[in-house]
Amino acid sequence: MRNSVRFKFILGLSMIFIISAVALNLLIRQVFETNLENIIKNSMKDTMKNSREYLRYNMKSKDSYENEKSFYTSMRNLLNNSVLTYNYEFEIRNPSGKVMESNMSLDSNELTEKGAKSALKGEAVINLKYNSDNVQAVLSYPLYYEDKCLGIINISQNYNNMYLENKRIVDVITVIEFAVFIVIFILSYLFTSKIIRPIIVLTKQIKKIEDGDYEIDLDIKSKDEIGILLNEFMNMKDKIKNQIQTISMEKDKVLKLEKGRREFFNNVTHELKTPLTAISGYAQILLDKDVEDKEFKDRAVQRIYLESERLHSLVLDLINVSKGLSFLEEDKKNIKMKSLLEDICNDMSIKAKKYSIDIRVNIEEGFIIGQENKIKQLIINLLDNAIKYSFSEESININAFNEDKTYTIQILNRSNPIPCDIYNSIFEPFVKGNNTIEAGSSGLGLYICSEIVKEHNGQIFIENGNEVKVTVKIPSL
């Protein structure tokens, strides 16, 4: 809690408010106290002026009195008429500082003695004394008549009503300050909570992301810096989520490729081992000089030749697979598809006729940009597959036409439907069917075809059934 932003923010504001309130209260008290002292001093100055003038105009010469006592008694009577009317206390001293007349209380002794010392020096002073509920003022000044000091006058008055009123106002202001501080503190807490709440929510959501939970949504209403922060967080969360999904997909692809790589080499080992085993076995038999059967020798030689051709074909397929994976390309050029397809169909018709299969063509003019040798290989592989898996005495139809800036090639043949397990992975390496009129298929033909089509930014797909249709679409000029 002490390390939270809310605690620090509220603590900081509270310290600022407390210090400001205390300083303001002290300043107000000082202002009110100074104002009260000014009022008291002005009042006492007026009293001094009035009493001095009154005595000056009403006093007779000191020599006209019988003695000093009667003089100061007369002065007391004059002060009673002018000062005591306003509830003042006074004290009269002779020029040497001796008290001649007085009605002051003992509480004023300290102030009168202090004031009398200043008055003896010819100064008029006002001294103040504060109590818990009162302030007492003592005015001390020398009285002159015809440039001759007649004595020292000390006049005292209590300003308790004014002091209590002043204190009451200051106390009210203090209470108001305290109330304002409480209100400001509450508002600051609420305001701070409103500011901090999105940050707290954001912290919780970040912890969810740390745990891998990206299914979060923030209701962002503010457009200030906090709102911008939340928006940027949501954008970051979406990007991280997309990156994680991409990494996961790439991981699956890598695992799939690794699995395919293992299967690839396992199949390569098997495919290469089978013809080599047959060649080696027949060769060892032929090396045996005791073999006299000419018919067996001829069959063995024929078998060695066929297996050698099969091995040669398999090696060529593996080389093509390697090229398909690495895409070591030849230069691309404009290819006139009609003449290319017609030449290939004429060549493949020779093989088709061996199995009583007829190739029928319906080819339109069209041009693509590509690698001519690979396109030839693509068409030959597809036609070779169609011949291998077609029923005897049937026809293979080849249609080629332009459509929506795409040159489309369709090869249709009647055969048994492709089994589902094979059809679902038909374009993967070493996937081959069993219902073929020829033996020795490596299962790499359609995989190579798929790689060639991808290299030319095209599409290839097969429709399964009693009539199998292979469709190739390549961007045209």
Image: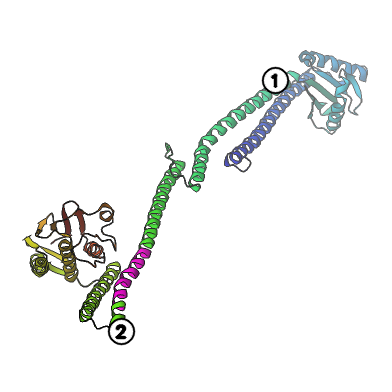
Judged left or right of residue 308, residue 187 is right
- Structure colour scheme: rainbow
User: Based on the displayed image, in which of its 4 quarters is residue 164 positioned?
Assistant: top right
Q: Looking at numbered disc 1 in the image, what kind of residue is underneath it? A: Glu
Please tell me which of labels 1 and 2 falls first in the chain. Answer: 1
Q: In front of the other: label 1 or label 2? A: 2
Q: Looking at numbered disc 2 in the image, what kind of residue is underneath it? A: Asp
Mark 1, secondary structure of its residue: helix
User: Based on the displayed image, in which of its 4 quarters is residue 136 positioned?
Assistant: top right
Q: x, y percentage for residue 25?
A: 67, 31
Q: Is residue 10 above or below residue 323?
A: above
Mark 2, secondary structure of its residue: loop
Q: Is residue 351 above or below residue 469?
A: below
Q: x, y percentage for residue 213?
A: 46, 44
Quadrant where the image shows the C terminus: bottom left
Q: Is residue 434 magenta?
A: no
Q: x, y percentage for residue 234?
A: 42, 45
- Closer to the camera in the image, 91 or 235: 235
Please tell me which residue is depicted at 44% across the width and 46% down the height of the picture.
233
Which residue bears the numbered disc 1?
165
Which residue bears the numbered disc 2?
288
- Closer to the camera in the image, 48 or 263: 263
Q: x, y percentage for residue 407?
A: 13, 59
- Closer to the camera in the image, 399 or 22: 399
Does residue 99 show up? yes
